[in-house]
Image (cartoon, rainbow, N blue to C red):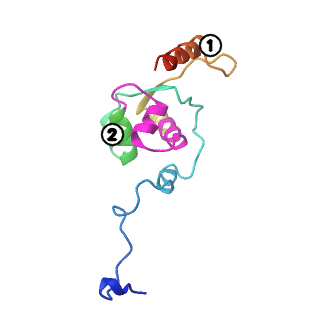
Amino acid sequence: MTDPRSGGGWRPPPGPDEQDLESPVRPYAVTGGRTTPRIELAMEALVCSADAPPHAFALITPEYAAISELCRQVRSVAEVAAVLRIPLGVARVLIADMAAEGLLRLHQPRLRGGRPDPGLLERVLSGLQRL
């Protein structure tokens, strides 16, 4: 069906660069539909780029490249997700995959019985109260 305001001509569907890039469909397509990372990865875990051999970057995806570039400075998993505007679950999957391939280094927090250190929680609370 044609739009009378367009002069009667047919228009092709929008290309990938014209589609809404904020759609949640694309990020989950990047993970192959996986929502659980290969390893347990806390959102406060610190991530930094590893010194990978050049052949490791031969088939790097745009998402991997963006994460690798961002993590030249140490970042938390949550910060990577926020800066790249991707869901936290997607960031966890991608970061875990990259760590398994040796492209990133992870620094996981030490948990006691599955809970964070009480001293860390107190420091976070104190910092929030100062805001």
- The residue closer to the viewer here, 38 or 20, is 20
**Disc 2 packing (10 Å; few <14; some 14–19; many ≥20):** few
* Magenta residues (range): 71-96
Q: Residue furthest top?
A: 119
Q: Could you tell me residue 52's position as x and y percent? A: 35, 31
Q: Which residue is mark 2?
A: 55
- The residue closer to the viewer here, 26 or 126, is 126
Image point 32% across, 86% down: which residue?
A: 9
Q: Which quarter of the picture shows residue 57?
A: top left
35 sits left or right of 50 in the view: right
User: Is 3 one of the magenta-colored residues?
Assistant: no
Q: Which residue is mark 1?
A: 118
Relative height, residue 85 to residue 49 (above, below): below
**Disc 1 packing (10 Å; few <14; some 14–19; many ≥20):** few
Q: Residue furthest right?
A: 113
SS at mark 2 in the image: helix
Q: Which quarter of the picture shows residue 51?
A: top left
SS at mark 1 in the image: helix
Q: Could you tell me residue 69's position as x and y percent? A: 32, 35
User: Is 76 one of the magenta-colored residues?
Assistant: yes
Relative height, residue 73 to residue 31 (above, below): above
Mark 1 belongs to which amino acid? Pro
Mark 2 belongs to which amino acid? His
Q: Separation of disc 2 and disc 1 at Cα?
A: 43 Å
Label 2–label 1 contact, CB within 8 A: no
- The residue closer to the viewer here, 82 or 102, is 82
